[in-house]
Amino acid sequence: MQLIISKMHSGLTFKTTNSNSFYVILLGLAMGVLFSCKQQGSTAIGFKLPEQGKDFTLGQDVKVSLDIPKGEEVTGATYLLDGKQLGTKANGDDFSFPTKDLSLGYKLITAIVKHSGATDTLTVNIVLKSDLKPVDYTYQVIKTYPHDTTSYTQGLEYHGGRFLESTGEYGSSTLRWVDPATGKALKKIGIDKQYFGEGSTLIGDKIYMLTWQNNLGFIFDATTFKQLGTFPYQNSREGWGLTYDGTQVLKSDGTNRIWFLNKETMKEERFIDVFDDKGQVDQLNELEYIDGKLYANIYLTNKIAIIDPKTGAVTAYIDATGLLPQKDKFENTDVLNGIAWDAAGKRLFVTGKKWDKLFEISIAPVKK
């Protein structure tokens, strides 16, 4: 059907070239109603405050104000944040809520407003940013260990005198137990060449390992490396880093988001978004949980972010520039990646992709 529309001073007229004129008439009536509404203006209730996408600092109260057209009477309003109820009002008065105990990132404010015999649901997004200026840390090398230069390090942990290391790249991804003294694999398996290996973590007698873009993780027996199963990702974009805080599994996906997974089912249960005082911190990679804080390599940089896992705020940065001497960098030497913590000995280890060395370091705030 060919529809010809011409605009007249009195509105819109419609012509049709076949017998479907009935439907065209209905379309014309509907468009006429819309045109009339636009001419007369809207009477819908909306948000006056906050503005869509407005930035707030953690700890700052958020004021919510309704834009109520003349003649409308609000008889009740319920306010929610990310689906959780914050409070109610018996009228259209302003409402405010604190942010000091919230996590960072995008937040959805919802208002369910009763007025003049009707109920409207309104939504607006805000961005909650960190109120902390991160502390700058420097490092000191305590001891140097050998590291396999074929290891494109993606995951690194320390357990019982050994390193658990997972490596990447298509066709050469591996999972291995490594002897710190020699840097050689005590036990090692290759991952099928269709997968690009990523982070890994030990939970009990099982190892959980990510792949990059296959939306799939593997479960292995920690002793034999026999594959016991797989698990899919849900809403996370990709697989990058993995660690365990004693209760949940924490996963990075290359963005500024950290996912919290159920350790039994590996289902994503919640997330935090990571921000510093300047904005969101992207490219979070290999992870390590250390004494209540989350340490994360920032891909393609020499920085390690120290993150509050309750809020997502970066509390400090470790600048590892110069850790691997220039003379020890080869053609295939890649970026800093790999953090391991010896909980019993309180030792911190770091390395990089295809580095020939792994370092035990201590850290301290930079003296001003």
Image (spheres, helix red, strand yellow):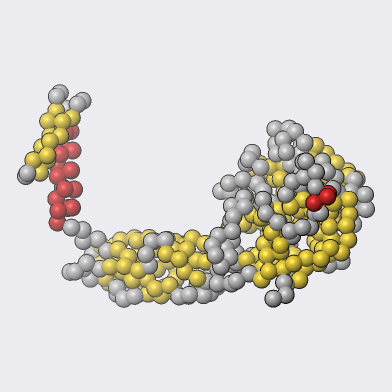
Front residue of 293 and 331: 331
Furthest residue in direction front, as rendered: 327
Quadrant of image for the N terminus: top left
Q: Is residue 354 visible?
A: no
**Relative image position of residue 210 (x, y in whole percent):** 70, 45
334 with respect to 129 (left or right): right
Residue at point 42% right, 64% down? Answer: 54
Please state the horizontal and vertical placement of residue 171, each as a whole percent of the image: 75, 33
- The C terminus lies in quadrant: bottom right
Instruction: List x then y, in percent, for residue 141.
Output: 84, 63
Residue 315 is situated, as x and y percent measured from the top left of the image, at: 64, 69
Question: In the current view of this chain or complex, which residue is farthest to the top?
Answer: 18
The residue lying toward the viewer, choosing from 165 and 229, is: 165
Q: Is residue 105 visible?
A: yes
Q: Is residue 310 left or right of residue 96?
A: right
Residue sitting at 64 percent across and 38 percent down? Answer: 214
Q: How many marks?
A: 0
Residue drawn where x is 25% and y is 68% of the image? 68
Q: Residue at x 59, y 55 (%)?
A: 282
Above-or-below relation of 26 to 296: above
